[in-house]
């Protein structure tokens, strides 16, 4: 988020200094190597570097002294108890206080709990070497990984949380070129808007996944249900795609933080707590389907396609693939895996995995395939070749990319989420068999009773 914001502000004509404490990241950027995978970012960054509008350094003192507006864009990960870890925010706030040389606007860009704006203001005030004027503003981001550049340059709205007219005026001028609605509000409301938006979207995803699980049992098609529901303008069709749960660096940690924030004021946020619980269970759906299709996983080899939590990013934080791989390994299964962007990151987290160079090497000689991330490369793969390369024919589609009829024609035993699949037809067949057995039992019992009555009469 920090790098994307910096590059986009430069694209808007501003002079930007990007600061990071990790020397490796800055060295890569200065050598024109992108440390993250994000669509269109590298090209835009190089263009603005050539125009002299952006630079990269580890010298925080230099960055502070030569800036009018300072964006804090550090990580706020979850602590073990679910609270947001604000330690990086606190460290940066103290450094800003020490190196101020005039009026500064300090902007909380990171997702932070309500009250952080006041906390940062207090830290700066208490740690200033000299008394300079400053304002602290809450300016949450709403970008999506994979489309972060597009989302930053084409926002739905800009939220500016401040009680300072001067800061509001400057921040409005900074964002005016984007042409988006600008909402100026108090800092507490701005901080809450971010959490509320993410929690609502996370709940919307989770709701549709619950509907999908019911659809599977009833024979309904969650894709058709989502289409019909999404035509309601009050709901819209966004975030209604059923699958195997949300992940990434925002929804999981922000929902947990919101629950903890509510607990601090003695309120139990049951809806969001349930969304978190359901999402954790949803990540296990592919494993449940695999276990039914292959009762004994031990000794079997499974290909996992996709490691990032979503397409067009290399982010594996809270990714469903981690849960799927860990569970299969616990049952004694072997893993082959491929992802177009996230394998370098995954190697640091997921061990005892055979990482391959392409999708076809991943599926070669495996007993089953589990597709976790809906990369375009997977949508376009040659499925007939995939079937030919596999030892088995089990294909579990965690993102509903393919069609049951076409997959079965190719010879796959196909499983998906919220639609009729091999599992549904297998259960239906078992129910028919059980019903037929019951009918036969009733018929034979009736015949026995008739024979007994006949014997008694004789």
Image: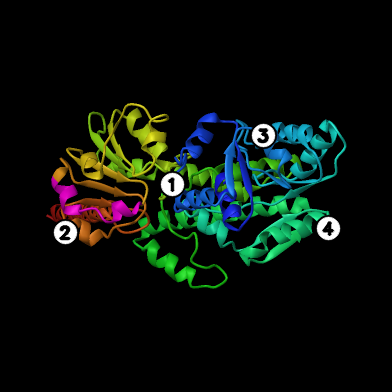
Give SS at disc 1: loop
How far separated are the C-alphas under marks 4 and 2? 66 Å
Query: Does residue 265 sit above or below 410 in this rendering?
Result: above
Q: Verify whether residue 11 appears in magenta.
A: no
How far separated are the C-alphas under marks 1 and 3? 28 Å
Instruction: Please give the name of the residue rendered at 51% of the width and 49% of the height, measured from the top-left corner.
Output: 50
* Mark seen at residue 313: 1
Image location (x, y in percent) of residue 99: 76, 34
Point out the frontmost of discs 4 and 3. 3
What's drawn in magenta, residue-wise?
A: 375-388
Q: Residues within 10 Å of mark 4 (few under 14, many from 20)?
A: few
Count of labels shown?
4
Query: Residue 118 appears in which quarter of the rendering?
Result: top right
Q: What predominant SS class does the magenta segment belong to?
A: helix
| Sequence-first disc among 1 and 4 | 4
Query: Does residue 420 sit above or below 386 in this rendering?
Result: below
The residue tagged 2 is 409
The residue tagged 4 is 165
**Camera-nearest residue between 113 and 424:** 113
Point out the frontmost of discs 3 and 2. 3
| Sequence-first disc among 4 and 3 | 3
Point out the frontmost of discs 2 and 1. 1
Query: Residue 152 appears in which quarter of the rendering?
Result: bottom right
Given the current orientation, which residue lies at the most extreme right position? 131
Give SS at disc 4: helix
The residue tagged 3 is 60
| Cβ–Cβ under 8 Å for marks 3 and 2 | no
């Amino acid at each position: 988020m920090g790098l994307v914001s910096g590059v986009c502000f430069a694209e808007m004509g501003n002079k930007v200094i990007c600061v990071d404490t990790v020397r490796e990241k800055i060295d890569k950027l200065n050598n024109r190597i992108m440390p993250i995978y994000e669509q269109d970012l590298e090209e835009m960054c190089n263009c603005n570097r050539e125009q002299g509008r952006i630079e990269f350094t580890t010298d925080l003192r230099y960055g502070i002294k030569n800036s009018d507006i300072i964006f804090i864009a550090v990580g706020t990960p979850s602590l073990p108890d679910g609270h947001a870890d604000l330690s990086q925010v606190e460290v940066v706030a103290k450094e800003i206080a020490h190196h101020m040389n005039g009026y500064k606007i300090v902007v909380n860009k990171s997702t932070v709990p309500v009250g952080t704006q006041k906390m940062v203001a207090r830290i700066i005030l208490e740690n200033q070497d000299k008394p300079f004027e400053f304002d602290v503003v809450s300016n949450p981001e709403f970008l999506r990984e994979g489309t972060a550049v597009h989302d930053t340059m084409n926002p739905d709205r800009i939220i500016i949380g401040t009680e300072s007219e001067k800061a509001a005026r400057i921040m409005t001028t900074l964002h005016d070129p984007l042409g988006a609605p600008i909402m100026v509000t108090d800092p507490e409301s701005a901080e809450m808007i971010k959490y509320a938006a993410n929690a609502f979207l996370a709940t919307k995803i989770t709701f549709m996944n619950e509907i999908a699980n019911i659809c599977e049992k009833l024979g309904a098609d969650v894709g058709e249900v989502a289409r019909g529901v999404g035509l309601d303008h009050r709901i819209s069709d966004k975030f209604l795609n059923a699958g195997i749960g949300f992940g990434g660096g925002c929804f999981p940690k922000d929902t947990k933080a919101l629950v903890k924030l509510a607990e601090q004021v003695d309120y139990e946020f049951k809806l969001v707590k349930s969304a978190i619980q359901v999402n954790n269970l949803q990540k296990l759906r592919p494993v449940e389907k695999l276990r039914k299709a292959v009762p004994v996983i031990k000794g079997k080899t499974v290909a996992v396609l996709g490691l990032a939590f979503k397409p067009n990013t290399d982010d594996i934080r809270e990714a469903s693939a981690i849960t799927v791989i860990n569970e299969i390994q616990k049952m004694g299964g072997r893993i082959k895996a491929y992802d177009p962007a996230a394998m370098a990151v995954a190697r640091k987290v997921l061990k005892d995995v055979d990482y391959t160079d392409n999708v076809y090497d991943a599926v070669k000689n495996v007993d089953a395939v589990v597709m976790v991330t809906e990369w375009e490369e997977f949508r376009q793969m040659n499925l007939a070749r995939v079937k030919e390369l596999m030892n088995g024919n089990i294909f579990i589609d965690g993102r509903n990319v393919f069609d049951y009829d076409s997959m079965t024609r190719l010879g796959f035993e196909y499983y998906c989420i919220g639609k009729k699949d091999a599992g549904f037809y297998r259960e239906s067949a078992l129910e028919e068999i059980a019903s037929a057995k019951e009918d036969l039992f009733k018929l034979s019992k009736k015949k026995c009773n008739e024979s007994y009555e006949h014997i008694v009469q004789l």
